[in-house]
Image (cartoon, grey):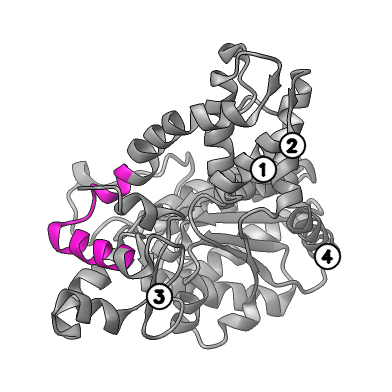
Amino acid sequence: MDPVRNPFAPGAGQRPPELAGRDRELDAFEVVLERVARGRPERSLVLTGLRGVGKTVLLGELRSMALRRGWGAGKVEARPEAGLRRPLSAALHRAIRDLAVRHRAPDRVEQVLAVLKAFALKANPDGAKLRDRWQPGIDVPAAQGRADSGDVEIDLVELFTEVAELAADVGSGIALLIDEMQDVPTEDVSALCAACHELSQSGAPLVVVGAGLPHLPAVLSASKSYSERLFRYVRIDRLDRSDADRAVLAPIEREEAEITPDALDALFDISGGYPYFVQSYGKATWDAAVRSEIGAEDVRLAAPEAESELAVGFFGSRYERATPAEREYLRAMAELVEGRDEPAPTASIAQYLERRPSSLSPARDSLIKKGLVYSGERGLIAFTVPHFGRYLLTQD
């Protein structure tokens, strides 16, 4: 098989494995866009799931859908310990530019950009020297008295209102997409919830679409008790057998090749239906196959190559971020669940390590902040990365 034309390489296919089986989510977002455009109340959307299920790719497709409908759209990737003002300002700046080409009043666009600049400049610490002050790259003077109070909750409500009104001027809307939403600082999460609440009350055409790890709903709920009414939560999981097969068959058939039923069985068993793994094992199998019909033996021969790449780029890069104490905790989790993708009782981890539960809290909390584990319910802890426990059991 020609590795140059590998249909499983990133960007090679018309629809990557991460989007196979996501028709329900895409159709639901189409409804959201239509309802918001008609001025009807609609909740913002939050996608949750483990790493490797294709949340980021799906988020990108939702952004493309909004743009195709003539909306302004901006995307943010939240980072731990980093405030939201800077990245949010950049994302909304892009969304406003999307709308500006259709707006007939340049002065009105500049008014909104002035408010955005005022909001953005508050990212600078008080008393910062001129040479150290960040400039958002917006070529209008900053507004005064609007979105510049320094209270992010007040400012974000005012900014969202201005931007949404600009979109309404052209009969359109704004989509703000936030990846890794569980990493948004607590104060900013509270402000986002407050802004979404305000906009939902007024029917303004702005929708927030967040994506994050399974414990994201708990993060939002801890910030604002009414958050469950603001967002529609959609769990993104691994693919079922039919969708996993479709993710494999479609790119192979586009290249006029074939794959045997036994090979499909083998790929599903080894990938577990997780889109990232479907793509990784599919790519390695294509490169290993010597005939136009891919068989189960090709999958078996390719598996070590795929696993080697995953060990470095997917598992290893995350494991390297853990301290020795955190690695001890992770290994104990893996041992207790015998490498399966299941939660482990925190009390059992303490017992296994012969430590007091309170002494392990710092390691556990740090691993949660690093996005390596999550707590779906009290007393249980699980890996955010599928097959991570299995990987850990292979490490010395």
Query: Type of residue at label 2?
Result: Pro
Image marks 3 and 1: residues in contact by CB distance under 8 Å: no
Relative height, residue 276 to residue 213 (above, below): above
Q: Which one is closest to the eye, mark 1 or mark 4?
A: 1
Q: Is residue 312 magenta?
A: no
**Disc assigned to residue 141:** none
Q: Earlier in the sequence, mark 4 or mark 2?
A: 4
Q: Secondary structure at mark 1?
A: helix
Inspect this view and state whether residue 21 appears: no
What is the spatial separation of the Cα atoms under label 1 and label 4, in whole angstroms? 41 Å
Name the residue carrying label 3: 375
Q: Looking at this view, name the residue that lies furthest to the bottom.
A: 225
The part of the chain drawn in magenta is 316-334
Residue at position x 28%, y 81% in the image: 348
| Picture coordinates of residue 216, whole percent (x, y) | 49, 70
Left or right side of 261 for 390: left
Q: Earlier in the sequence, mark 3 or mark 1?
A: 1
**Disc assigned to residue 265:** 1
Q: Magenta part mainly helix, strand or loop?
A: helix
Query: Type of residue at label 4?
Result: Arg
Q: Is residue 317 magenta?
A: yes
